[in-house]
Image: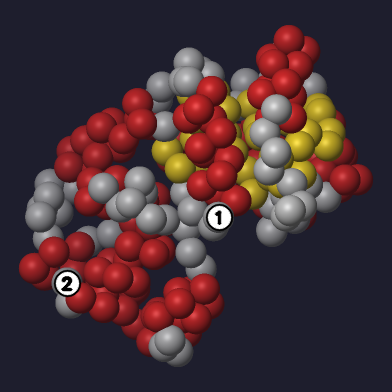
Amino acid sequence: MPTPLRILVADDHAIVRQGLKLLIDSQQDMKVVAEAADGQAALERAAAVKPDIVVMDLSMPGMNGLTATRTLKERQPKVTIVALTRHEDETYLEELLRAGASAYILKQSAPADFLQAIRAVAAGGIYLDPAMTSRVAGGLLAGKPHVQTDTSAKLTERETEVLRLVAVGHSNVEIAARLGIAVKTVEVHKTNAMKKLGLTGRVDVIRYGVLQGWLYDT
């Protein structure tokens, strides 16, 4: 049996932490190894226990979840962060994605969605709460009207393949290994695809992936 995912839960409400711990520990493939009540404590606990995944509340006293996420990714680049929040606002979502979070899940969501988010990021993917996908896609269309909904004809098959893997969270090295091509070749395809679509960064690529339905088809 594989080793369970080691998870740190950071939330300023003890009752929420307890609920998440009970839910996570009820799964055979994951286990809570540490808890924290604020961002600074999350950084300290993460340094001590080296978790695989940190479930990070956005609104915490002192150092908030966004600052903690940014700092944690700088200190421990390999740690995966699942942002857990009540905020249904794409601004928070974009800032957390830029900071390095791999999942954005709402506290209002079903426990099954939360567990799916953890498993998705553990497998190297990205997960956005289903309630947010229409907002994210809408933001792409509103912010970049020159980007068409159906742009598949503009991209080559390989460019589409590379961009899809980027959108769901894979690194250039992982994509190269998966497709059996050089890392430089991946970079060329990625650059060309983003240029054709007018995408300028990670958030844009993820938004485009949402629009194409790639994030839930990995």
Question: Between residues 163 and 28, which one lies in front from this camera angle?
Answer: 28
Question: Between residues 205 and 120, which one lies in front from this camera angle?
Answer: 120
The residue at 48%/64% (across/down) is: 170
The residue at 18%/38% (across/down) is: 142
Contact, CB < 8 Å: mark 1 with mark 2? no
Residue 96 placed where, x, y %? Answer: 52, 40
Side (left or right) of 41 relative to 202: right
Residue 42 placed where, x, y %? Answer: 79, 35
- Quadrant of the rendered image containing residue 35: top right
Side (left or right) of 113 relative to 132: right
For mark 1, give the secondary structure.
Answer: loop
- Crowding at dot 1, Cα within 10 Å, few <14 / some 14-19 / many 20+, comes out as few
User: Which residue appears farthest toward the front when viewing the image?
Assistant: 1
Q: Which-is-in-front pick, marks 1 and 2? A: 1
Q: Quadrant of the C terminus?
A: bottom left
- Quadrant of the rendered image containing residue 188: bottom left
Colour approach in the figure: secondary structure
Question: Between residues 146 and 37, which one lies in front from this camera angle?
Answer: 37
Side (left or right) of 211 relative to 98: left
Regarding residue 97, the answer to whether it shows in the image is no
Measure how far apart labels 1 and 2 are at the Cα level: 27 Å
Image vertical order of residue 19 relative to residue 191, above or below: above
Q: Which residue is mark 1?
A: 123
Amino acid type shown at disc 2: Leu
Task: Decide which of tag 1 and tag 2 comes sooner along the chain.
Answer: 1
Image vertical order of residue 144 relative to residue 31, above or below: below
Q: Which residue is mark 2?
A: 155
Residue 216 placed where, x, y %? Answer: 35, 46
Amino acid type shown at disc 1: Ala
Residue 58 placed where, x, y %? Answer: 60, 26
